Image: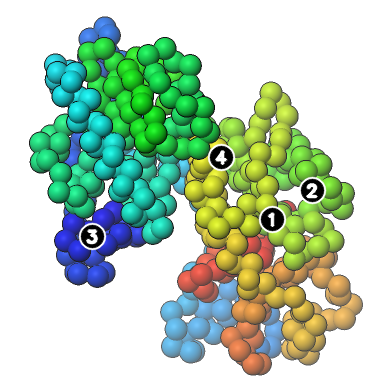
Amino acid sequence: MICRKCKTAIIDNKKMCPVCGRALRGSSRKWKVLAAVFTGAAIVSIFVLRGDGEPLTYEEQGAYYEAQGEVPPEIAAGTEVVVSDDASEISLPVSQANLDKPILEVWAMIDEVSRLISEYHDRFSQSVTFLSKNGYLFDAPAGNYVFIEELYSVFNIDERFLDESIMFFYFRPIDLYGRRNLSVSERDELVIFTGFETREGFAVTGRGEQGGMITREELREILDLYSWNHGEVREVDSQSDVFELSMRAIAGYTGHSTGFDIRYMYQDDRYICLVASPGNAPLNISMFILEYVEGAVYVRLGNIEELENHIAAVNNALPNFNHALLPPYNLRLELRDLRYDFADIIEQMIGNAYFTDDDLPPRFMSGTDEFIYFEFDQGRAFLAHIKGGDNKTAYFVESHSAARELLTSLSRRPPLFIIRQS
């Protein structure tokens, strides 16, 4: 979202510009929120498309924080972290074009707007992550599809354009290549196409792409290729066939045969996103995206944690991947905080009777300078909070979901990747 007054790119969905203080508009265009209902035989609905001492009990944890004058965190054992399948939460753009607009005027208009939307993208791409969501241009930080009024807030454009149902698609030209009446390249990177509906179909053009006319049926086929809707987003069951197939896939991809500690693993009906480390290398944490293909599972993207902007990179490589599957953190940044040596922490916690020498070594441990997650035999797990010096608190947690919930309550930037999901 761009502030209309000072032209600042607002990367969060805020109500007020942090630079000039101007109140920001909401999604005011009425056709942003309409359901796509087309009437007539030739038109169909195709365009509807976010411590110390003994381990504390839950009651003691509350008392501990109250004694320090802090609000006790809500600790709920067994509470699952909910990842929303937001692919259809926001109403998709709807064409309400004047089908009788002279075709020469249509081409003149979308040629001009295509130039402006490209300039808009270039100007703000360093501060705003633009995605192809369901085939349309999407401003990820603002959580909105991009409409013509966004350009009006930045450029001195003809106000008449605001009354036109101009649409911004975000396609790879290669997916349009070979369609009859279209002149496009075979480029496989995402390009913004400006479109306008006419009686003959959609007139489309993009930067470096002449474009042309595309039928409604052809456009429907292309939009289907970019759909994020692949069913419910859910945690992968470690006892499922999907889990076993995924482990084999990443073992073959990485060459590790010692098994993996899964830090995060969610799926829909097409893709799987997981964060994992080899069983003998807990510091080697990587992110993968896998895909179901005819009953098998294959790695589509690996080493995502190394990417500068993993959200944009994933979208460009797999524009139909639902980003609700991604973990709620930037692993590339978070891994800088990993702790490499736990010896002093273990020694101090043994001295405080959190566990004994007989419990060592832990079955699993991972952490940062502030939080460390331990798992021992018999299913015992602890989350240790180091506040500096000897000020340490250890919490017994009954499940990985309870550990995530607790960690989220203790930190504004919780390092959720230290917790083993399975």
- Mark 4 or mark 2: name the one nearer the start of the chain: 2
Which residue is labeled 2 in the image?
A: 254
User: Does residue 403 appear anywhere in the picture?
Assistant: no
Q: Give the image location of residue 2, x and y in percent.
A: 26, 56
Task: Indicate the amino acid at tag 1.
Answer: Ser
Which residue is labeled 3 in the image?
A: 7
How busy is the neighbourhood of tag 3: few (under 14 within 10 Å), some, or many (20 plus)? Answer: some
Which residue sits at x=18%, y=47%?
152
Task: Indicate the amino acid at tag 3.
Answer: Lys
Which residue is labeled 4 in the image?
A: 317
Does the residue at mark 4 contact the one at mark 3 (Cβ under 8 Å)?
no
- Mark 1 or mark 3: name the one nearer the start of the chain: 3
Which residue sits at x=36%, y=50%?
122
Residue 57, compared with residue 226, is above or below; it is below
Q: Is residue 261 left or right of residue 212?
A: right
Residue 109, compared with residue 283, is above or below; it is above
Label 4 and label 1: CA atoms lie apart by 18 Å
- Mark 1 or mark 2: name the one nearer the start of the chain: 2
